[in-house]
Amino acid sequence: MQMGQNAIKSLFPILFFVLIFSRSVTGQNIESATNQLMVDIILQDTIVSENKLRSIHSKIEKGLLTVEDSVKYVHTIKERNLLLYKYQENIKAAEILREDLAENGVVTSELSPDIVQKAIKQFPSNREYVFDFQWGEVKLTGVLDKWVMYHKFSSPVCIGDNSYLIFHYHHISLRNHSIEFLIFSLDDVEGYQIKKKIGLVYS
């Protein structure tokens, strides 16, 4: 009996190490997946959509745009600066969710009051990113120019088994911006999988 108790006690340090190591690996995976998700979204700023190409072609045919100007326009999009605001937008994300919860809004309807409440409690204070983005020329910026395209994200918060919520603000121009919440999961192959997009504002 005593030997059995001693054996169990000897396992405690090992189990504790395994638990801490598992949490550490999971945390690293979440950070890596979140970074890649943000970069993939920001990289879309340099993509000329098929709808935009059709619009350009139509303007050329109607004589509203020269071929030379269209080439310059496409080049400007492809060479656009890719900017991420250097502070996580956690306080704003929690504030929007509180308002949504109080009004039984879009996010609350898509998820549930319990899940939204759980997410609100997990958002930390706004934090500065402490890493360097090296993918696709994405740069951190502390200057928010209303004339320039940029992105803001919150930190991800866990809302279920392998399910995370992140806030995304996309400043497009002086009068255009979008706000959405993304639900994603970790994926061993792709790094992450977006499970749902909940758009709140697009103007």
Image (spheres, helix red, strand yellow):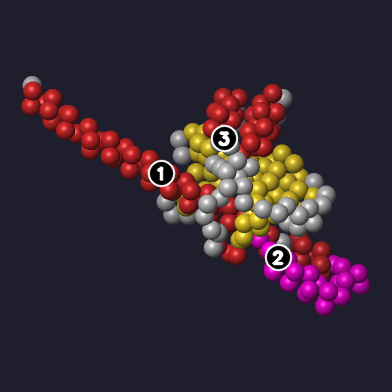
Q: Residue 62: within the magenta?
A: yes
Q: Considering only vertical position in the picture, is 77 above or below 90? A: below
Q: Residue 97: within the magenta?
A: no
How far apart in space, not on screen, are marks 3 and 2 (Cα)?
Answer: 31 Å
How far apart in space, not on screen, are marks 3 and 1 (Cα)?
Answer: 18 Å
68 left or right of 25 in image: right
Residues packed near mark 2 inside 10 Å, few (<14), some (14 to 19) or many (20 plus):
some
Residue 16 in percent (x, y) is at: 28, 35
Residue tagged 1: 26
How far apart in space, not on screen, are marks 1 and 2 (Cα)?
Answer: 34 Å
Q: Secondary structure at mark 3?
A: loop
- Main SS of the magenta segment? helix
Mark 2 residue type: Arg
Residue 42 in percent (x, y) is at: 63, 56
Mark 3 residue type: Phe
Which residue sits at x=66%, y=61%?
A: 82
Q: Secondary structure at mark 2?
A: loop
Residues packed near mark 1 inside 10 Å, few (<14), some (14 to 19) or many (20 plus):
few
Q: Which residues are magenta?
A: 58-82
Residue 30 in percent (x, y) is at: 47, 46
Going from N to C along the chain, the mark reached first, 1 or 2, is: 1
Task: State if disc 2 and disc 1 touch (CB < 8 Å).
Answer: no
Question: Which of label 3 and label 2 is nearer to you?
Answer: 3
37 left or right of 77 in image: left
Quadrant of the image containing the N terminus: top left
Residue tagged 2: 80
Q: Secondary structure at mark 1?
A: helix
Which residue sits at x=68%, y=33%?
A: 96
